[in-house]
């Protein structure tokens, strides 16, 4: 999606605390995929897992990591996964539901399709 | 008659619960009960997106969410590897 809509939007992945770490709510599906990490205790551990993710999936969307006090997650209630769209003025114009059941990339795409960029935005 | 209906309804409920446990796995259900942290949160459409400091992938450099705002809409994707 980030590649497809690169001309219409910016993308930022906010890497938050683990949803299904070994020492909490481990999922069988993660074991099958060899995604087995404990919940990080330090920022270094969290950043290392984020880097593993980026490497494994060649993830080229800009990504930044939430601090260990989880300030971004506390503000945005992003756990385990969630989309927002913020307009150029900084106003939230779309708030998705939490994943997995409420996580719908197609809703983001629909919003982006319905809001093509202005000439001024493209010129920036 | 009422008793029979109740028995059938109870059996259906038990069967449904057994299906959920079987399909999700008991461990996943226990994990969900104990560790599910899904929240709706206070932010809503129309609010100003609050700024927050984040850490870049090098683990050192700090970036701010607001630095990504402007020009085009910003799609925020919250998530983790697991």
Image (cartoon, coloured by chain):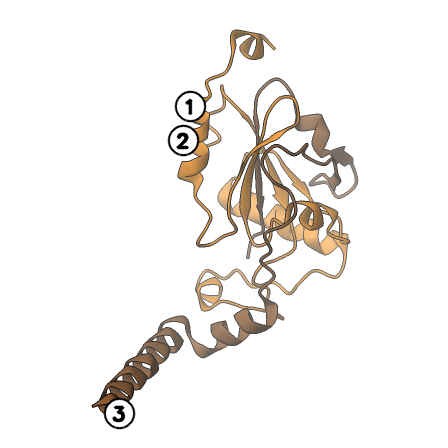
Q: Are marks 1 and 2 on the same chain?
A: yes
State the residue lying farthest toward the left: B1
* Marks 1/3: CA–CA distance: 56 Å
State the residue lying farthest toward the front: B2
Residue under the image location 61 percent in, 63 percent down: A37
Question: Quarter of the image holding residue A39?
Answer: bottom right
Q: Check the picture and name the quadrant holding the C terminus of chain A.
A: top right
Give the residue pinned by disc 3: B3
Image mark 3: chain: B
Image mark 1: chain: A
Residue under the image location 49 percent in, 23 percent down: A6
Which percent across, then down, holds residue A94? 53, 35
The reply to whether callout 1 and callout 2 are in contact (CB within 8 Å) is: yes
Residue A114: image tag: 1
Residue under the image location 54 percent in, 34 percent down: A60
Please identify which colour was used for chain B in the image.
brown
Image mark 2: chain: A
Which percent across, then down, holds residue B41? 63, 50
Which percent across, then down, holds residue B38? 58, 58
Q: Nearer the viewer, residue B24 or A89?
A: A89
Q: Is residue A51 above or below residue A90?
A: below
State left or right for residue A71 relative to residue A20.
right
Give the residue pinned by disc 2: A110
| Labels 3, 2: front one | 3
Please identify which colour was used for chain A in the image.
orange
Q: Check the picture and name the quadrant holding the N terminus of chain A.
A: top left
- Crowd tier of the residue under label 2, counting other residues whose Cα lies within 10 Å: few below 14, some 14–19, many 20 or above: few
Residue A56: image tag: none
């Amino acid at each position: 999606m980030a590649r497809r809509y690169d001309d219409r939007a910016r993308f930022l992945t906010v890497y938050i605390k683990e949803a299904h770490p070994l020492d909490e709510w481990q999922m069988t599906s993660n074991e099958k995929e060899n995604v087995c990490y404990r919940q990080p205790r330090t920022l270094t551990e969290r950043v290392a897992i984020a880097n593993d993710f980026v490497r494994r999936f060649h993830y080229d969307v800009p990504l930044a990591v939430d601090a260990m006090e989880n300030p971004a997650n506390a503000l945005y209630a992003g756990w385990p996964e969630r989309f927002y769209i913020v307009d150029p003025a900084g106003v939230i114009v779309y708030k998705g539901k939490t994943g997995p059941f409420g996580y719908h990339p197609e809703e983001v795409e629909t919003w982006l399709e319905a809001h093509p960029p202005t000439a001024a935005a493209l010129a920036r | 008659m009422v008793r029979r209906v109740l028995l059938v309804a109870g059996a259906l409920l038990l069967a449904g619960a057994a299906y959920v446990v079987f399909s999700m796995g008991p461990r996943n259900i226990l994990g969900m009960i104990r560790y599910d942290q899904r929240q709706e949160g206070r932010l809503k459409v129309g609010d100003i997106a609050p700024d927050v400091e984040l850490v870049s992938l090098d683990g050192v450099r700090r970036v701010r969410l607001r630095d990504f705002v402007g020009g085009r809409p910003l799609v925020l994707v919250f998530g983790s590897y697991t």
